[in-house]
Image (cartoon, rainbow, N blue to C red):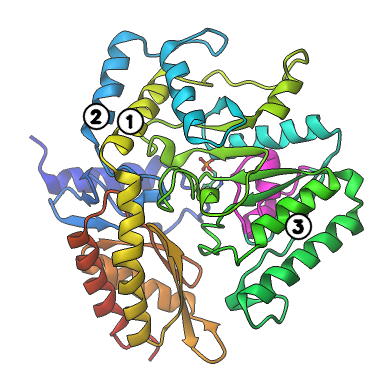
Amino acid sequence: DTSPAELDALTRQLDRDHVFHSWSAQAGLNPFVVAGGLGSRVWDYDGRSYLDFSSQLVNVNIGHQHPAVVDAITKQAQTLTTVAPATANLTRGEAAKRIVDRAPAGFNKVFFTNGGADANENAIRMARLHTGRDTILSTYRSYHGNTGAAIVATGDWRRIPNQFATGHVHFFGPFAYRSEFWSTSPEQESERALHHLERVIQSEGAGTIAAILLETIPGTAGVLMPPPGYLEGVRALCDRYGIMLIFDEVMCGFGRTGQWFAFQGYDVVPDLITFAKGVNSGYIPTGGVIISDEIAGDFDTNVFPGGLTYSGHPLAMASIVAALDAMEAEGIVTNAARIGTDVLAPGLAALAAKHPIIGEVRGVGVFWALDLVADPETREPVSAAVMGRIKSELLARNLLPFLSDNRVHVVPPCVVTDAEVAEALAIYDEVFGLDLLG
Ligand code: PLP
């Protein structure tokens, strides 16, 4: 008999008293309360509904409460809720098969983890064992997860207080709008970023480098679309110097770019692929490494020194099987591609043409960022205060946004409809039309 107002108050009270939140000073937090969701919307206890243009943490690719996935989890729970990783389990095999079927030829094995960070952790371990080398190169503009090696491979500020793993070196990836290389075109940015990377490889000593770990399209760092030839050039450098290429597809994989994997938009194949989030839209925590035959072959006779109690957990595996089958049957990845090309690309370009605060629009599929500037000439990022105002104005208009630094990331579920995008574009338009900088 608890009223919605009481449930809301209880949620806030328990959260304030007992829940310790990620990446935050705990005092004064006022988290958004989610009571339920369906498709591209979530709602609070008052029944007020919001367009979820964050996909939570850019992971609910299939939308909230997809009935086939909820059903598969329920059925699996009634059959077998847990099983040791060393057993053979049909649901786990079915999940692994569906994942490798979407990967390029030459990838036939999956190592399951609990999420994205430990996927990167284990990919790094495999690359080190395969090459007999230690160093991992990754970019400053990156996030790879919050565990030992993954947080040190990360480039953004979250690395700094956590630098306890060894063997990590960072470099600058390409970012034409805010170039580190004084370039004036995407082609030049690509060429100069590759030159910089090769000089880093040579300076560290090519023979010491196990892998280059890259988000195929850096996500939290700002949906940084690789300029022409960059990823192909990185592959060529890896081949020249005997370095493994790991693509972190945790955020950009499984439909977000309008393809199963973001790298399928480029002419490049890595040696290891890490995934999590979109593979089952986070309905049950899971992730993993898709392993090339060459690296998997190392462990035919050598022991792989790694494992997790919940590797290939049956509830997670059932949700992967159902999510991938539904995404295929319902054309959900195709929908993400179409929405990107036909609706978001022109819609966001029109917003940028109208509102000078939008310095650049970048993205593909349902994976976009608006880079907001105080001055279009200098490209000075807007302040945190302006971002705070934008967040509250969007929420006041029933849109749940994803904000990072000076950017609004436009990242709805892959199932988003034309009408929902139109609704969101109208809300963004109204908010960017306010006197935000004054
Ligand atoms: N890699 C990328 C590109 C991510 O965006 C994230 C999470 O946001 C991770 C790794 C870490 O995944 P998880 O939080 O599941 O450990």
Crowding at dot 2, Cα within 10 Å, few <14 / some 14-19 / many 20+, comes out as: some
Q: Is residue 330 left or right of residue 299?
A: left
Q: Is residue 139 left or right of residue 333?
A: right
Residues at circles 2 and 1 in contact by the CB criterion of under 8 Å: yes
Point out the stretch of residues depicted in magenta.
142-165
User: Where is residue 202, by image quadrant?
Assistant: bottom right
Q: Nearer the viewer, mark 3 or mark 1?
A: 1
Q: Label 3, on which residue?
A: 170
Whether disc 3's CB lies below 8 Å from ligand 1 is answered: no
Queried whether the magenta region covers residue 149, the answer comes back as: yes
User: Does the rendering let one see residue 54?
Assistant: no
Q: Residue at horizontal 21%, vertical 67%?
A: 422
Q: Residue at horizontal 56%, vertical 54%?
A: 266
CA distance separating discs 2 and 1: 9 Å
Q: Label 2, on which residue?
A: 68
CA distance separating discs 3 and 1: 38 Å
Counting from the top left corner in percent of width and height, residue 258 is at: 40, 52
Query: What is the three-letter code of the residue carrying label 3?
Result: His
